[in-house]
Image (cartoon, rainbow, N blue to C red):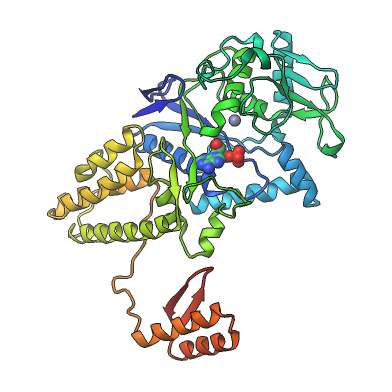
Amino acid sequence: MRLFDTLTRTERELRPIDGTTFRFYCCGPTVYGPAHIGNFRTFVLQDVLRRTLETGGIRTLHVRNITDVDDKTIRDSQKAGQTLTEFTAGWTAKFHADCEKLALLEPHIEPSAVGHIPQQVAMIEALIAKGHAYPSEDGSVYFKISSFPAYGKLSHLDERELDLGKTQNARANSDEYEKDSVSDFVLWKARRPEDGENFWPSPWGDGRPGWHLECSAMIQEYLGADFDLHSGGVDLVFPHHENEIAQSACACGGHFAAHWFHITHLLVDGGKMSKSIGNLYTLADLETRDFTPMEVRYVLIGGHYRKQLNFTLDSLHAARESMAKLAKGARKLAAKTGGDITLDSAAFGPFQAAWDSLNDDLNTPAALGGLFTGLRDASQLTGREAAAALAGLNRVLRALGLTLPVENEDPVEIPDAIRSLAESRWQARLAKNWAESDQLRTELATQGWLVKDATDSYTLTPI
Ligand code: AMP
Ligand code: ZN
């Protein structure tokens, strides 16, 4: 499989360094609220990468962390009146539930920052001993950027208009991103009154690790100084991943990640997602609108990971239609096998092009297109050939992590009179005419139809 690498800016073959297992690390969620669909774009694409490797016969070791201590988790746990542990446990559970719905394979190892404080302290000690870090007056410890000449290679800092000279001695203490400055960054944050009970002892006094450090420490613990691939959304390239490289290379030696896989951001209706604009969608928001997690997954893989993906509710409707078409095609193909079954084969038959697309820089939209052309090409096949084609289709679907809907062969026809009653009821509801809306609901029920309301639409099902 070939994949674009952020560091070298070239497509390169993915091969396990140790010849057996492809070992990779993904920066995981910060658990202070529900993950949004932008986060899930990144996690879903990482999942497709893993599934594609595994479908191609490569064993993987997938490590994804949980960020359960930083400025935001501390701030919001206090707002919620919970301990940091209770608060982050709740959001971690919600994240896991969403991942399961979206058919994300569980990482083999899911370490958390709070669970690895001693490893982080040890890494800071190593950095100080080697002259790459220094304690400041207040008991914090900083990484000394000028001690690592390779700083900036991943994000190609030399090509960016940053005044390196001016910022060289600056320090950054916040966990929030410092997008436009290059500064000595914090490894250990001295305890502040607003941290409450959230601090740990260290040789430099009470405090807590800086955000960048946790990934370096956990990578060293579970993958060592050399591993196959590191991944996150593009926003992590600088400074987070740049800082991880600096910490790990200086503390542990080695080459760190052999390959860098960054997923471009998801936009909503052409713009950035934000709570204040009200266009920040979680999986739960979309489920309330009666979309299924599989439809969400389909949309998330519907664009190439190196291009921005513009999410709209319309794209979910389109996903529903596409999946229904694929399901219909797959059912027709299954019917033509005449009971022949090909359990598993290395061949993809008419779905070879779809499979090749996945292996060509994880081109998921081309792979989805290949499912449709594959079904068209398979339409003449029967018996054993149809069974082999079906096995090929299922392998590509498995790599994409898609389960097609089990469609009702005879979609329910809604009589015009029922439709018009339901429409009148919806209008009454919009006008907040609750009495009339209730009366029409009862009327529909009497006639054998159940109305279910979503935020901006409704569904009708026979009782
Ligand atoms: P966070 O929980 O903020 O640490 O983010 C978890 C993952 O989601 C990281 O890999 C981020 O880079 C990624 N991410 C954040 N926002 C978006 C977005 N709008 N589109 C795609 N990935 C994103
Ligand atoms: Zn990280």
Left or right, 443 with reference to 3: right
| 356 in relation to 180, above or below | below
- 341 or 203: which is nearer to us? 203
Question: In the shown orientation, is residue 202 left or right of residue 224?
Answer: right
**Residue at x 23%, y 40% (from the top left corner):** 352
Camera-nearest residue between 45 and 397: 45
Residue drawn at the location 31% of the way across and 47% of the way down: 368
Q: Residue at the far right: name it.
A: 193
**What's the residue at 45%, 58% (across, down)?**
313
Q: Quadrant of the N terminus?
A: top left
Residue 23's spot in the image, x, y percent?
Answer: 48, 27
Give the side of residue 79 with respect to residue 343, left or right: right
Report x, y in % for residue 96: 58, 49
Q: Position of residue 181 (x, y in %)?
A: 64, 23
Residue 82 position within the rendered picture, expressed as x and y whole percent measured from the top left: 79, 50
> What residue is shown at x 39% (from left), y 82% (from top)?
419
> Is residue 56 visible to the viewer in this orientation of the structure?
yes
The part of the image, by quadrant, that contains residue 329 is bottom left
Count of numbered labels shown in the rendering: 0
On the question of residue 222 being in view, the answer is no
**Front one among 93 and 363:** 363
* Vertical arrangement, residue 387 with respect to residue 51, above or below: below
Q: Please tell me whether residue 312 is drawn above or below residue 460 in the rendered image.
A: above
Tell me the quadrant of the picture where the C terminus can be found.
Answer: bottom left
Q: Quadrant of ligand 2?
A: top right
